Amino acid sequence: MTSTDQQPFLSIRDLKVHFSTEDGVVKAVDGLSFDLARGKTLGIVGESGSGKSVTNLTILGLHDRDRTAIDGQILLDGNDLLSANERELERLRGNKMSMIFQDALASLSPYHTTGKQISETYRKHTGASKKESRQRAIEMLRRVGIPQPDIRVDDYPHQFSGGMRQRAMIAMALVCDPELLIADEPTTALDVTVQAQIMDLLKDLQQEFGTAIIFITHDLGVIADIADDVLVMYGGRCVEHGTKNGVLRAPQHPYTWGLLGSMPSLEGPVDVPLSPIPGSPPSLLNPPSGCSFHPRCAFTEKVRSGLCAAERPPLETAESHGAACHLTADQRRDFFADHAAPRSH
Ligand code: SF4
């Protein structure tokens, strides 16, 4: 999308991830393409079930292979991830790519000390000695701001506070200097102060290691803080993409207008009620025809009669900022100015 590299570090083309269920085929991701350059952050936003997390589990090769049909292409630094076997993926997870989750307790084992989990990850991927790996674990705990890391290295996860556990998980994710870090709502469960500290930490580590980051969130305020580029997902597809400033200041898709209108602002008046987007996210078993946002969209009547329900709008990809909507560019600019009036972030 907005990368200027000849060969983007991460390139995803027409990715489709479909699951077989007793009720039918769930089209969790249905034709997604994007690029990510080294050292840059892509924010992926959308409601639950929009396909954000499935996309990233597929990049990491952590999907259920028996029940999932995948099509398209994922290239990471020239490695074709969709044709890689489990052993190759295991090597890449750790050395090249890594993930931090919302719930550190669920991703750290309660049976082993935090230090052992970090050092074993390092040992497995680098072949370093036990002593070297322990030193590396201490160094990483220090790097993510754990006080007295040479002592805390022997603590179990339950002995850490929520914020410290999240830091420890980040230390484990970064211990092998991955070139791609996928962060799936990593700060949602934390209070605002700790959330800000973790975001600062990620930015510092990115500067230091040149890591490319995919940051998944439903919070556009977080995106405003950390992303270079933004991709808005709805119903398993990208409905808008562009630079952070482009998407947040001049959004082009009615769904993005809705997202911007339904989030609180630190700068606006505190007594303005939030305006959630009416309706529910689309069923991925029986997605709506045409534009999958049409049952919730307030602008369908501005388009030729019946077009929104009949034809899926193509995603504009020629420009660095584009949307998938039948409204003309002029209409979008006018309607956004007249109706959406997003709060400042
Ligand atoms: Fe709304 Fe139609 Fe645009 Fe979809 S294509 S977002 S339904 S105006």
Image (tube, helix red, strand yellow):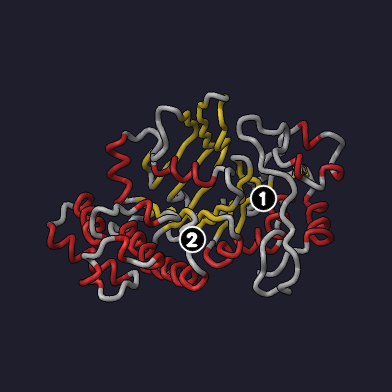
Q: Which mark is residue 283?
A: none
Residue 326, percent from left and from top: 77, 42
Residue 34 appears at what percent x and percent y?
53, 46
Mark yes or no: residue 140 visible: yes
Inspect the image, locate mark 1, and give the three-letter code of the amino acid beneath it: Gly
- Give the image quarter of residue 170: bottom left
Q: Which residue is mark 2?
A: 189
* Residue 37 shows in this picture: no
- The foreground one among 212 and 46 is 46
Check the image and report above or below for 181 versus 167: above
Q: Answer yes or no: do the residues labelled 1 and 2 have beta carbons within 8 Å?
A: no
Quadrant of residue 101 in the image? bottom left
What x and y, as percent, mark residue 259? 68, 56
Residue 28: quarter of image: top right
Rate crowding at label 2 as few (under 14), some (14 to 19) or many (20 or more) other CA atoms within 10 Å: some
Q: Residue at x 27, y 37 (%)?
A: 87
Looking at marks 1 and 2 on the same chain, the residue that comes earlier in the sequence is marked by 2
Q: Secondary structure at mark 2?
A: loop
Horizontal placement of 138 versus 184: left or right? left
The one of 191 and 235 positioned closer to us in this rendering = 191
Disc 2 marks a residue whose amino acid type is: Ala
- Is residue 314 placed above or below 276 in the rendered structure? above
Q: Residue at x 65, y 51 (%)?
A: 319
Q: Tell which of 150 and 299 is nearer to you.
A: 150
x 71%, y 35%: residue: 312
- Residue 176 is situated, as x and y percent measured from the top left of the image, at 28, 57
Residue projecting furthest to the front: 158
Q: Is residue 23 left or right of residue 273?
A: left
| Image quadrant containing the C terminus | bottom right
**Which residue in the structure is indicated by mark 1?**
322
Viewer-nearest of labels 1 and 2?
2
